[in-house]
Amino acid sequence: MNTFQEEVDVRISENKKNTKLCKAAKKFIEVSTSPKYSYNFSWLGRPIIQYPQDIVAMQELIWTIKPDLIIETGIAHGGSLIFSASMLELNAICGGPQDAKIVGIDIDIRSHNRKAIESHPMFKRIVMFEGSSISHDIIERVKEKAAKKTCILVCLDSNHTHEHVLAELEAYAPLTSIGSYCVVFDTIIEDLPLNSFPDRPWDRGNNPKSAVNEYLKAHPEFARDESIDNKLLISVAPGGYLKRVK
C-alpha cells in the first residue's frame, strides 16, 4: 500500500500535465496582480504581502530544513520576518536549533514598521540591518552573522530588477547550506503581461527570473526545485525555489 506522501508525490507530478488546472492557476495570478491580492494577508499581526501558497511552501521548507539562520532581503512591514521567526520558534520548541535567528535587510526601514517589529514577541529572533542589500558593508555584516551558523536559508525579496537580484544572488546564494534553499521571490514578473507594473523599474526581461536564469548558467551547485512549482501552481516565485545540491 502506498504511503500518503507517495500519493501526494503522484498528484504533484500529475499537476504539470493538467492543462486545465495550470491555465486556471495562471489566469488567477494574472487577474489577481492588479488588485494587489497578495497585500491582503498578515502573519501574527504584521502584513506579509505574499500569496498563501508561498507562505505554506516556506513553512514546509523551514520545518524540513531547520535552519539556524535565515537571511531575508526586503522587510517592508515585517510580516515575513515575523513569519520566519515564529517558524524558528516552533522548530526550537520541537527540538530544532535553540538559537536560530533571522537577519532582515532593507534599504529603508520605516520608523512605524521598525517600532511594530521591535515590539513583537518574535523580535527576539530577529536582527535588522538598514542599508542596500548589495552594499559591501551590509554584505560583510551578514557574512559575519553567518560565519558560525551551520544551516542557512536565504530569501531574496527586495528590489526586483535584474541587476539588483543578480548582485544579491552573487552575494548571498553562496551562504546557502547544501540541501537548503535560496528562494528568489517575484520571478512571476517574467510570466505576466508586459507592463504589468507600469510604476516600477522591472518588467519582462528585467526581473528576478531573468537574474536567476543568468545566475544558474554559472552555478551548477543550485537547481530549481520544480516539484514546489508543480505543487503550488499559484506562486510569485515560479522557478525561484533554488535548492543547493552541492
Image (cartoon, rainbow, N blue to C red):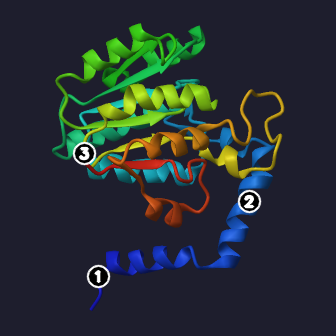
Pick whichever, 144 or 74, lies toward us: 144
- Distance from disc 1 to disc 2, alpha carbons, whole Å, reads 32 Å
Q: Residues within 10 Å of mark 3 (few under 14, many from 20)?
A: some
Left of 222 or right of it: where is 213? right
Q: Given the image, on which type of amino acid does mark 3 rest?
A: Ile
Q: Mark 2: which amino acid?
A: Phe
The residue drawn where x is 47% and y is 39% is 215
Name the secondary structure under disc 3.
loop
Q: Position of residue 59 (x, y in %)?
A: 40, 49
The residue at the point 77 percent across, 54 percent down is: 30
Badge 2 element: helix
Q: Earlier in the sequence, mark 1 or mark 2?
A: 1
Q: Secondary structure at mark 1?
A: loop
Residue denoted by label 1? 3
Q: Nearer the viewer, residue 87 or 208?
A: 208
Residue furthest bottom in the image: 1
Apparent side of residue 238 relative to residue 85 in the rendered image (left or right)? right
Res 81 seen here:
no
Instruction: List the residue tagged with mark 2.
Output: 28
Under mark 1, the amino acid is Thr
Of callouts 3 and 2, which one flags the residue occurring earlier in the amino acid sequence? 2
Q: Name the residue carrying label 3.
A: 178
